Amino acid sequence: MITVPMVVIRDYLPVLQQLVTAAAPAPGKTAFVRHPKTWQTGTLAMADLVCMVFDDDVPVALVPETARKLAEELIERSHQVESRHGIAH
C-alpha cells in the first residue's frame, strides 16, 4: 500500500483522472473473448489463400494447409465442449 499526502493528490488528481480515463477500455471491449455475430469465408483469386472475416473486421488469410488444420482443430474443440455438457449433434 502506498500513502500519498492530500496536498500531492490534490495537485495531481486531474492528471491521474485523465490517465485512468485514457486507459479504460472502450464500451463493448471489456470481454475476454469475442463472439462474432457474422462470418464469411472465401478465397482470393490472385493468391492461393483461404480467407475468413468476422463481422466487419479485417479479413484473415491462411494458406490452404493452415486453413485445414484450423478447421480440424475447431471441429475437435467443438466436440470437446459438446461432450463436457452432454450435448450431441
Image (cartoon, helix red, strand yellow):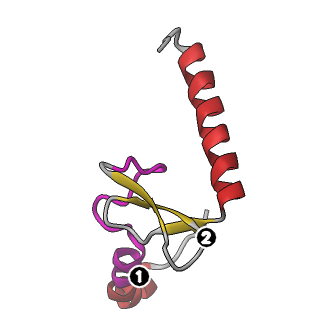
Q: Which residue is mark 2?
A: 48
Rendered location of residue 26, percent (x, y): 32, 68
What's the magenta region? 16-36
Q: Nearer the viewer, residue 17 or 39?
A: 39
Q: Earlier in the sequence, mark 2 or mark 1?
A: 1
Q: Nearer the viewer, residue 50 or 83?
A: 50
Query: Looking at numbered disc 1 in the image, what kind of residue is underneath it?
Result: Leu
- Relative placement, left or right, of 12 versus 73 is left
Position of 48 relative to 87 (above/below): below
Q: Residue at x 38, y 55 (%)?
A: 40
Residue at the top extreme, as displayed:
86
Which quadrant does the N terminus fall into? bottom right
Does 17 appear in magenta? yes
Crowd around label 1: few <14 · some 14–19 · many ≥20 (10 Å) = few
Position of 53 relative to 71 (above/below): below
Rendered location of residue 41, percent (x, y): 43, 56
Q: Label 1: state its secondary structure.
A: helix
Q: Residue at x 37, y 53 (%)?
A: 39
- Relative placement, left or right, of 48 versus 46 is right
Rendered location of residue 4, percent (x, y): 52, 76
2 or 1: mark nearer the eye: 2
Q: Which mark is residue 19?
A: 1
Rendered location of residue 9, percent (x, y): 41, 82
Q: Residue at x 42, y 75 (%)?
A: 23
Does 74 appear in magenta? no
Task: Report the Cα–Cα distance between label 2 and label 1.
Answer: 45 Å
Magenta span: predominant SS is loop
Query: Looking at numbered disc 2 in the image, what kind of residue is underneath it?
Result: Asp
User: Residue 67 falls in which quadrant of the image?
Assistant: bottom right
Q: Nearer the viewer, residue 49 or 28?
A: 49
